[in-house]
Image: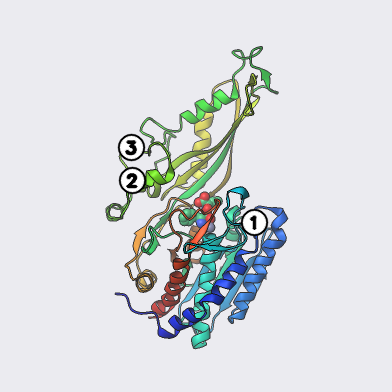
Amino acid sequence: MATNLAPELDRFLSENNDRIHDELFEFLRIPSVSARSEHRQDTMRAAEWLAARMRDIGLTTEIVPTEGHPIVIGEWRKAGTEAPTVLIYGHYDVQPAEPLELWESPPFEPTVRRGRIYARGAVDDKGQLYLHVKALEAHLRTRGTLPINVIVLAEGEEEVGSPNLASFIEDHAKRLACDAVVISDSSMFAPGLPSILSSLRGLAYVQIDVQGPAVDLHSGSYGGAVINPATALARIIATFHDDQYRVAIPGFYDKVRDWPDDARSRIRALPFEETKFAEEVGAPALGGEAGRTTLERIWTRPTCEINGLLSGYTGEGAKTVLPAAAMAKVSCRLVPDQDPDEIATLVRAHVERVAPAGVSVTVRALHGGRPWRADLKGPLYDAARRALATAFEHEPVIVGEGGSIPVVGDFERILGAPVLLVGFGLPGENAHAPNEWMSDENFVKGTRAIASLWDELRG
Ligand code: BES
Ligand code: ZN
């Protein structure tokens, strides 16, 4: 099935390999941390840098301001109306680098060690976004043309929940009209195993606040006579699961569609070792919903997870206090056809029902995103299979994902185009953590895979 990458693309990418890396490193040196106001200028600088590199290769560019960080658009539409139009999405912002003392080399000084490019944003998502730009360059420089029309849409707010992206897509749906959306912001299942993503979980994120007495009280003078908000919160969240680790919130599973049998057997066929996975996470044992394998639990089943708890005295030593308040951050990961707003409503109703008397409880929805599942059929997916097999000399596997990219559902809904998620990260890449890295081999092969994808798609 694997054909070869066109020789001129192959030669161009080999001959320019050093320069392409130098450019990527320049990109990685810009600390475009979207969450931090002190990096506002840096984030803008990353947007300008990216736009300039797209202009260098012949794209027309625009930096669109938003209420937050700008959206960068690059366009090339000279392939004609009979050629497909592809929208490439990625993000140029990165997560904060802290804690800095845990980095072996500085987060914004890219360093290559043992075939890995270490830097904040190396894999999430600057490396994966930039390889798309370089794949376009290979076509444009060697042939003076592209087999497809292209819109590159790079945002600077993915790591803070993309607050301005859906409305931008709605408002510019005509300009962004396309036949396919392609995203590289995910990982391969294992080294050497190119992977096409078939699903993402959705998200419903809520905050629970429990208020007791007006102020902290002496736990001796008042304890036993006033309901403790921390105990009340513990009792509430203890009702979220039954003893089989199923979510016990009424109505939670009502809209869950069972995973198709062929998809479940596909998951079982993947080379996955529970013991190795357990070692990687370093927990005493794995656990979750009864009757499901680890990959099924992560990819195909919804969850309700406590992400944070806050109450009372947590400093050094002991302090006898009955806290005035307690707080929990809770996120539910969702699968088709669960709806983030409906799930947040169910959680709120459940919490209000089980909340003990003597405290007041509020539940606030923070943000959400829809789950997504690909149908994996059609020319886009066929082209991707061929392109990945070419570049990696291995047939791609179909994988799921437990994380969320909320905009994927928005693209499909608003633009009506199929979305292809093909990522080049690897397990253990430390995205969002100290010592983030991207495999250099995957950067190089990923560029080639994407370069050949455009030829395959045109046919
Ligand atoms: N790149 C990730 C999403 C992702 C994670 C894709 C793992 C594939 C594998 C993205 O940057 C992310 O972290 N998303 C958030 C979404 C949330 C903030 C709305 C997530 O999944 O928690
Ligand atoms: Zn990302």
Q: Position of residue 242 (x, y in %)?
A: 39, 31
Label 2 belongs to which residue?
Answer: 274
Q: Secondary structure at mark 2?
A: helix
Q: Nearer the viewer, mark 1 or mark 2?
A: 2
Q: Quadrant of the C terminus?
A: bottom left
Residue at position x 39%, y 41% in the image: 253
Percent coordinates x, y for residue 386 in the rendering? 35, 73
Q: Residues within 10 Å of mark 1 (few under 14, many from 20)?
A: many
Kindly identify the amino acid type of the residue bearing the numbered disc 1: Ser
Label disc, if present, on residue 290 of the rendered structure: 3
Q: Is residue 124 above or below residue 293?
A: below
Instruction: Name the image quarter holding residue 449.
Output: bottom left
Q: Where residue 341 sits in the image (x, y, percent)?
A: 52, 45
Q: Residue at x 61, y 14 (%)?
A: 223
Q: On the image, numbered disc 1 is attached to which residue?
A: 34
Residue 198 in view, yes or no: yes
